[in-house]
Amino acid sequence: MALPTHIHLEIVTPDKLLVREEVDEVEIPGSEGYFGVLPGHTPMLASLTVGEMWYRKGQERFYLGVAFGFAEVLPDRVTILAQMAERPEDIDVGRAEAAKKRAEARITQLKSDVDYDRARAALMKSLMRLQLQSRSQLAGRVGRQRMPPPQA
């Protein structure tokens, strides 16, 4: 049996289907660390954490932010079921900055009624959004970054 040459990638949130594309490579923020997937990968199921993911089509990388959920990896398919997933162009920087400040304020409070795990998750999401937005501005194109050509 021949190995697949591409991966069918689907990224789904409770609200929408964000991505459905044929891609060459994917990198995903798993709860045990980032992991890469190429065509022909061994089947696995992984839980996700808050982080930046990317997928590559040809020489272009497309970045997204994801938070919590699961990734199902098959030799020819990757399905990501995420609590939250966003493209850089969908991020409201002002809102992310405000969320970061609120989360930091909650974490620094010494009150017994503060849900520190929830505040930490909110802080991680806001930092991921700001990092993703910053990357897209540096790349000069929203959500994409061209990889250098392979060296001969």
Image (cartoon, helix red, strand yellow):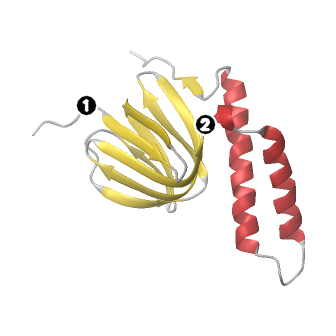
**Which marked residue is nearer to the observer: mark 1 or mark 2?**
2
Residue at 46% in and 17% down: 149
Q: Is residue 90 above or below residue 139?
A: below
* Residue displayed at 74% across by 42% down: 130
Q: Which residue is mark 2?
A: 87
Q: Give the residue type at disc 2.
A: Arg
x, y percentage for residue 66? 57, 49
Q: Nearer the viewer, residue 5 or 69?
A: 69
Q: Quadrant of the C terminus?
A: top left
- On the image, the x and y values in percent for residue 88 come to 65, 35
Up-down: is 13 above or below 137?
below
What residue lies at 60% left-to-right and 50% top-to-bottom?
A: 51
Q: Residue at x 49, y 23 (%)?
A: 60
Q: Is residue 103 left or right of residue 50?
A: right
Identify the secondary structure beneath mark 1.
loop
Q: Amino acid at mark 1?
A: Thr
What count of labels does the image hold? Answer: 2
On the image, numbered disc 1 is attached to which residue? 5
Residue 4 shown left or right of residue 9 in the figure: left
Residue 134 versus residue 12: which sits nearer the camera? 12
